[in-house]
Image (cartoon, helix red, strand yellow):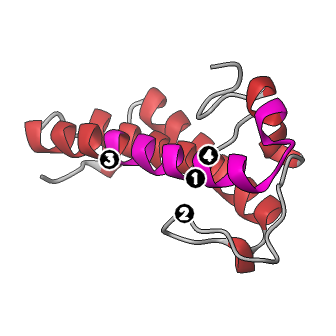
């Protein structure tokens, strides 16, 4: 599996740039000390609904998915595509767990959820 970055097609390049912009924006909005690899809530955590979180509930997952999609487009090997599918399923499961935790903790989460997309705005 070797990705050919020297000849990224315009779509892969655009997805990569979009991925970085979304990811950096999400980290800035969330703040570094609130980031976790495994969905957990600490006592000091607050529901973030501003910045990119006004449109997307899981922008960091979106960023990872867009980057992986860009890499998959540069490498048509079936293993790259399999990894993308596995990652997508993993992020859906993680986002389900995260949403369950957030819904239990924050009374306003359901209203927020109804106004935003999970990974993409309006979806």
Q: Which residue is mark 2?
A: 39
Cα–Cα gap, marks 1 and 2: 5 Å
Q: Earlier in the sequence, mark 1 or mark 3?
A: 3
For residue 27, above or below residue 6: below
Q: Earlier in the sequence, mark 1 or mark 2?
A: 2
Q: Earlier in the sequence, mark 2 or mark 3?
A: 2
Q: Which residue is mark 1?
A: 98
The span picked out in magenta is 89-111
Q: Which residue is mark 3?
A: 87
Within 10 angstroms of label 4, few (less than 14), some, or many (20 or more) residues? some
Cα–Cα gap, marks 4 and 3: 18 Å
- At x 41% / y 45%, what residue is drawn? 93
Q: Which residue is mark 4?
A: 99
- At x 71% / y 63%, what residue is drawn? 27
**Of 76 and 10, the residue lying toward us:** 76
The question of residue 16 being in magenta is answered with: no
């Amino acid at each position: 599996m070797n990705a050919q970055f020297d000849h990224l097609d315009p779509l892969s390049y655009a997805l990569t740039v979009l991925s970085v912009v979304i990811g950096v924006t999400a980290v800035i909005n969330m703040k570094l000390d609130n980031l976790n690899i495994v969905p957990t809530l600490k006592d000091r955590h607050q529901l973030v609904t501003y910045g990119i979180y006004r449109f997307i509930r899981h922008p960091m997952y979106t960023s990872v998915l867009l980057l992986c999609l860009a890499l998959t487009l540069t490498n048509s090997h079936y293993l790259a595509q399999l990894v993308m599918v596995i990652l997508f399923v993993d992020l859906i499961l993680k986002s389900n767990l995260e949403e369950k935790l957030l819904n239990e903790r924050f009374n306003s989460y359901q209203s927020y959820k109804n106004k935003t997309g999970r990974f993409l705005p309006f979806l």
